């Protein structure tokens, strides 16, 4: 298995707002950076509460995964960062619509703040199918 890093980038998801990549592939593993609810067409945070923001986060993650040649069925681990755990149930309803069994492993944590004052950020790890 190669240990070379391949940068994954797409204009269908928000551009990185710092010194990082949207995703990095190493061998058969893809690591995405956390996605926040920025509309890539406008560069602005989407309006709305946790449902609208989580929906946009998944659109952004899907764009990065698609550019990398995988989809949500290849995701093995996610980390969800919430500004408030009171948003957990509503976020979880949107989350569940994007995955089928077997669901990826997941950690969900409440954080003091997120970039651009968003309510949610999600990152994931995906595995490429063995040829």
Image (spheres, helix red, strand yellow):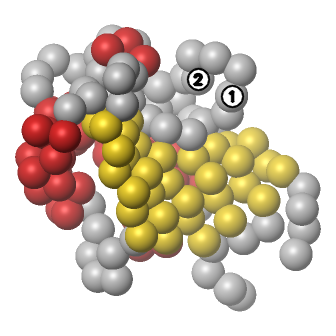
Residue 20, position as x, y percentages in the image: 68, 28
Q: Is residue 63 above or below residue 77?
A: above
| Most foreground residue, 51 or 80 | 80
| Most foreground residue, 82 or 8 | 82
Q: CA distance from mark 2 to mark 1?
A: 6 Å
Please report the residue visible at 20 percent of the width from the left and 63 percent of the height from the top. 96
* Count of marks overlaid on the render: 2
Q: Is residue 127 above or below residue 19?
A: below
Q: Is residue 31 above or below residue 99?
A: above
Residue 24 in sight in this render: yes
Please report the residue visible at 58 percent of the width from the left and 23 percent of the height from the top. 16
Residue 79, position as x, y percentages in the image: 43, 51
Please report the residue visible at 34 percent of the width from the left and 83 percent of the height from the top. 102
Residue 86, position as x, y percentages in the image: 11, 38
On residue 16, the disc is: 2
Residue 66 in sight in this render: no
Q: Is residue 42 above or below residue 81?
A: above
Report the quarter where the N terminus lies: bottom right
**Left or right of 120 in this view: 27:** right
| Most foreground residue, 49 or 129 | 49
Residue 45, position as x, y percentages in the image: 29, 16
Report the quarter where the C terminus lies: bottom right
**Left or right of 115 in this view: 129:** right
* SS at badge 1: loop
The answer to whether mark 2 and mark 1 are in CB contact below 8 A is yes
Packing grade of label 1 (10 A; few <14, some 14-19, many >=20) is: few
**Left or right of 89 in this view: 2:** right
**Left or right of 11 in this view: 79:** left
On residue 20, the disc is: 1
Q: Quadrant of residue 52?
A: top left
């Amino acid at each position: 298995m190669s240990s070379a890093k391949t940068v994954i980038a797409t204009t269908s998801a928000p551009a990185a707002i710092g010194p990082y990549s949207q995703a990095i592939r190493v061998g058969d593993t893809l690591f995405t950076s956390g996605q926040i609810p920025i509309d890539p067409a406008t560069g602005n945070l989407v309006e709305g509460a946790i449902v609208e923001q989580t929906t946009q986060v998944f659109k952004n993650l899907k764009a990065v995964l698609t550019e990398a040649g995988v989809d949500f069925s290849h995701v093995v681990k996610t980390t969800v960062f919430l500004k408030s755990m009171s948003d957990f149930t509503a976020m979880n309803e949107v989350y569940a619509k994007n995955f089928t069994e077997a669901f990826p492993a997941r950690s969900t944590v409440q954080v003091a703040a997120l970039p651009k004052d968003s309510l949610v950020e999600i990152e994931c790890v995906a595995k490429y199918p063995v040829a």
